[in-house]
């Protein structure tokens, strides 16, 4: 068979595939990226992270949310907000991000081949593209195909009133009421956005708690905000099926025999690895029932020269972590041994309203592990910047070891949480103690001062117990 030869073929051009390709090219390898969409960037740029975060920015601005506590509950930048208002910036941001990615790939001499990739055998990939078929032969292959929304035969997605998370911005009009099925990150983020716009949201989650991997005190604080925004939470309830109503509305039938009706429904119950087109059988690799490919800590599959990275390998399924996995896999694939990366210092940013961010252990994990810890809490209202900005409900929670004083976790809810967390991340990465925050001068007035307040608070509690 005649084939174009590469040192590395990367299947998928999302964050994990891009970073893998660029890292290999920096090692002077000949690299091809195969992408089935007409543009690069994956779910991250085209349908997931970037569109949802751009929409969130529009929601915050147009609804006046950030300034309601300063100028009053009726403060608005725009009175009647439409779906077109929310989508206004999205295409421009997507286009810029696609351009930036394309430029980066071409600057690094990486060939982008458009089409659907599937394995012919463990070293050959056939690409069925708009311009015909191509075969690529490669010493190493990195699978970076990401995920697609999970579906159910009992939930008839129609793209208008019953939608998945790829279709939010296609809603023809802003619904008056919205049912969100799934209290994972996607469900909770969109529930917050629509509730902030005044839509009556019902959030249905089959588990007893939302966002189980986050610190539960922070999740409780979020639940307070959700209720305040008139979100009805139905926890411990499973949606069995969904129907369209003759009047154009929708109804969700719960396993408990209850019915919940609304103008529209967002089905966000998780995502499935996009492995169906790959013909993995030709390699001997098997994905699990959720389409996830098993890998070791270096993202190597059971076939030595094939790696898998990003969402297709499962938790945490974040763009940030996917990029790092791509970089690590590329270095490992070429035995360069250059990467040092510690997953315990990967942060989590959840763009709810208000946003949540954390790093390290939660109180629940430390309690399970019998680690003696102390907590220091700072409320945004205690620092001048919190008052100036009008965010008086935000809080920063610092967790440190009672004996070594090492910082074990930082959990934040409030404006700027996803930026603020990186201060704690740096201290943790350099093995720092709570004393760093006591001895450091922060700009005034800033939200970063919360670290100092939390440190004093935690040390105060500890000394009180010690007498
Ligand atoms: C609504 C939403 C919001 C999100 N928000 C955030 C956030 O705020 N922060 C964050 O860190 N993460 C967020 N994420 C998660 C983030 O988008 C993913 O973690 C990230 O995109 C995963 O990157 P990836 O490289 O694994 O795959 P993807 O970005 O999914 O890209 C995979 C690419 O592979 C291509 N492909 C698939 N199969 C083939 C094939 N056979 N041949 C050729 N090409 C193929 C696909 O077309 C796609 O372009 C969000 C996700 C969603 C859905
Ligand atoms: N800010 C961010 O970092 C960000 C934002 C959005 C998405 N993401 C990533 O995207 C991925 C997918 O997110 P997701 O929220 O779709 O998936 P998820 O798996 O995190 O959550 C799905 C939720 O739906 C619930 N559920 C499943 N079936 C149900 C049913 N029939 N009725 C009621 N509840 C049901 C599950 O219990 C679960 O809590 C996540 O892994 C996440 O990391 C990240």
Image (cartoon, rainbow, N blue to C red):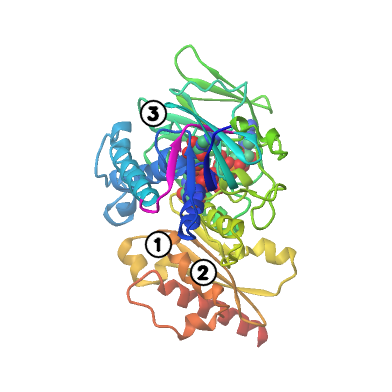
- Circle 1/circle 3 CB separation < 8 Å: no
Cβ of disc 2 within 8 Å of ligand 1? no
Crowd around label 2: few <14 · some 14–19 · many ≥20 (10 Å): many
Crowd around label 3: few <14 · some 14–19 · many ≥20 (10 Å): few
Return the x and y of residue 2 as percentages of the image width and height.
55, 33
In the image, is residue 110 part of the stretch drawn in magenta? yes
Q: Which mark is residue 425?
A: 2
In the image, is residue 196 part of the stretch drawn in magenta? no
The region drawn magenta spans: 107-118
Q: Which corner quadrant of the image does residue 176 belong to?
A: top left
Element type where label 3 sits in the image: helix
Return the x and y of residue 118 as percentages of the image width and height.
59, 33
Image region (quadrant) for ligand 2 = top right
Q: Which corner quadrant of the image does residue 148 belong to?
A: top right
Mark 2 or mark 3: whose residue is earlier in sequence: 3
Q: Residue furthest top?
A: 246
Q: Quadrant of the C terminus?
A: bottom right
Q: Tag count in the figure?
A: 3
Residue matched to label 1: 392
Q: Nearer the viewer, residue 314 or 37?
A: 37
Return the x and y of residue 205 as percentages of the image width and height.
61, 38
Element type where label 2 sits in the image: helix
């Amino acid at each position: 068979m005649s084939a174009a030869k590469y040192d590395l073929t990367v299947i998928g051009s999302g964050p994990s595939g891009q970073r893998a390709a660029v890292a290999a090219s920096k090692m002077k390898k000949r690299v091809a990226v195969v992408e089935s969409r007409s543009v690069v960037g994956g779910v991250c740029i085209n349908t997931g992270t970037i569109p949802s975060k751009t929409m969130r920015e529009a929601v915050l601005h147009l609804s006046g949310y950030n300034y309601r506590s300063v100028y009053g509950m009726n403060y608005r930048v725009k009175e009647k907000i439409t779906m077109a208002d929310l989508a206004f910036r999205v295409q421009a941001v997507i286009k810029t991000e696609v351009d930036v990615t394309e430029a980066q790939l071409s600057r690094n001499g990486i060939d982008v081949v458009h089409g659907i990739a599937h394995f012919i055998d463990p070293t050959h990939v056939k690409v069925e593209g708009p311009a015909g078929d191509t075969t690529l032969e490669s010493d190493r292959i990195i699978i970076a195909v990401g995920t697609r929304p999970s579906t159910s035969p009992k939930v008839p997605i129609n793209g208008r009133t019953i939608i998945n998370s790829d279709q939010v911005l296609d809603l023809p009009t802003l619904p008056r009421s919205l049912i969100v099925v799934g209290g994972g990150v996607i469900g909770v983020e969109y529930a917050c956005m629509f509730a902030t716009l005044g839509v009556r949201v019902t959030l249905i989650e089959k588990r007893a708690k939302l966002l189980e991997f986050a610190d539960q005190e922070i999740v409780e604080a979020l639940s307070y905000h959700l209720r305040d925004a008139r979100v009805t939470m139905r926890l411990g309830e499973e949606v069995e099926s969904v129907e369209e109503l003759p009047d154009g509305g929708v109804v969700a039938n719960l396993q408990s025999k209850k019915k919940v009706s609304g103008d529209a429904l967002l089905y966000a119950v998780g995502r499935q690895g996009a492995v169906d087109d790959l013909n993995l059988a030709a390699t001997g690799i098997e994905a699990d029932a959720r389409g996830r490919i098993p890998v070791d800590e270096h993202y190597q599959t059971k076939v030595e020269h094939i790696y898998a990275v990003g969402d297709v390998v499962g938790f945490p399924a974040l763009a940030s972590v996917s990029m790092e996995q791509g970089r690590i896999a590329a270095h490992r694939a070429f035995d360069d041994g250059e990467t040092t990366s510690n997953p315990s210092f990967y942060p989590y940013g959840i763009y709810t309203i208000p946003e949540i961010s954390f790093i390290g252990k939660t109180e629940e994990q430390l309690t399970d592990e019998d680690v003696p810890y102390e907590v220091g809490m700072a409320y945004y209202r205690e620092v001048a910047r919190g008052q100036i900005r009008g965010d008086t409900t935000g809080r920063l929670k610092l967790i440190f070891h009672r004996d070594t004083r090492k910082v074990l976790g930082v959990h934040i809810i409030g404006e700027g949480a996803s930026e603020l967390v990186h201060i704690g991340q740096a201290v943790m990465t350099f093995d720092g103690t709570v004393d760093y925050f006591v001895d450091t001068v922060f700009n005034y007035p800033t939200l970063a001062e919360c670290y100092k307040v939390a440190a004093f608070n935690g040390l105060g509690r500890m000394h009180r117990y010690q007498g």
